Amino acid sequence: MDSINNFHPADIVVLVVWGSIFITFIVKLFQSICLVPTKSAYVVERLGNYSKTLEAGFHALLPFIDRVAYIQDLKEETIDVPPQECFSKDEVNVEVDGVIYISVTDPIKASYGITDYRFAAMQLAQTTTRSVIGTLELDRTFEERDLISAKVVDVLDKAGESWGIRVHRYEIKNITPPQTVRLAMEMQVNAERERRAILAKSEGDKQSVINRSEGLKREMINVSEGEKQRRINAAEGKAAGILALAKATALSIKKIALVIDQDGGKKALEMQLSEQYLKQMQGLSQSSRKVILPANLLDYQQWMNTMGLNKVDK
């Protein structure tokens, strides 16, 4: 207690000041040690001026002289573009929103080239979307999403060169027309769907009729082909029968001729003809036709000569 009382108040103030300075120095010394994570960049200023950009790893700064002014995330990030009202070429008010995918490529430009590159990219995307939709009719706005996205990305890329960012893509999430327009579009879609259904049904009926007629045609062709083949087969069979009969007749005549040339063959032939002659005479009583007979009924040779002229109609 006596040693403390011996200190003058001015000395105590000096000790407090020096203690504060020491503590501040220790704090600044620890703050000058930087551990930069992967995919990050620290922009360092020395006495208010840009000094260097720290990449991932361990870094030590000069206390009281160097400071980390900006911390930039180099990973790709998404920025929601709020819904905005746009007018199409045919004066229809639609509400459009989207999302931008960007990443920082130059930490220095992203820090000093613009105040807030995220807000700037969002605003530029909205204005570009409005201008592009203004050149399209309502129906085309739903079909040309890729065109709108491509133009927005092109404009943002040109601006991003000076902002130190890269715009990877821009996607339109929703294009919302007014309620009345939606109802009209639904009616149009339903009418188009009904028209296609009617057209499909008529095409089906048409194809069914065509198929039935083709079936009947093929059936008639098959029947005619079958009848044709039947007649051909019958004619070929008849021709074959006639040919076989002719061959048999020729063979029999040949054999008869051979028999006649032999001894007693002529008499045998005459006996056979006489037998046939008597049979023919026996059948005259039952015939309804008039015939011319030879004077001598026993003369079968004279009968044979008149056989071709003895038949007359009643």
Image (cartoon, helix red, strand yellow):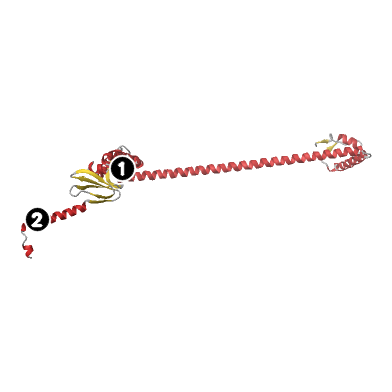
Whether residue 294 is visible to the viewer of this picture, yes or no, is: no
Q: Earlier in the sequence, mark 2 or mark 1?
A: 2
Q: Residue at x 82, y 36 (%)?
A: 311
Return the x and y of residue 218 as percentages of the image width and height: 59, 42
Q: Is residue 196 left or right of residue 258?
A: left
Q: Amino acid at mark 1?
A: Val
- Pointer 2 with pointer 1, Cβ within 8 A: no
Farthest-out residue, bottom: 1
Q: Which mark is residue 167?
A: 1
Q: Considering the image in quadrants, where does the C terminus appear? A: top right
Return the x and y of residue 199 as percentages of the image width and height: 45, 42
Q: Where is residue 250, by image quadrant?
A: top right
Farthest-out residue, right: 263
Which residue is the site of mark 2? 14
Q: CA distance from mark 2 to mark 1?
A: 57 Å
Q: Considering the image in quadrants, where does the N terminus appear? A: bottom left
Q: Is residue 300 above or below residue 31?
A: above
Query: How busy is the neighbourhood of tag 1: few (under 14 within 10 Å), some, or many (20 plus)?
Result: many
Q: Is residue 173 above or below residue 10?
A: above
Query: How busy is the neighbourhood of tag 2: few (under 14 within 10 Å), some, or many (20 plus)?
Result: few
Q: Amino acid at mark 2?
A: Val
In this rendered view, identify the residue nearer to me: 249 or 175: 175
Q: Residue at x 20, y 47 (%)?
A: 66
Q: Which mark is residue 142?
A: none
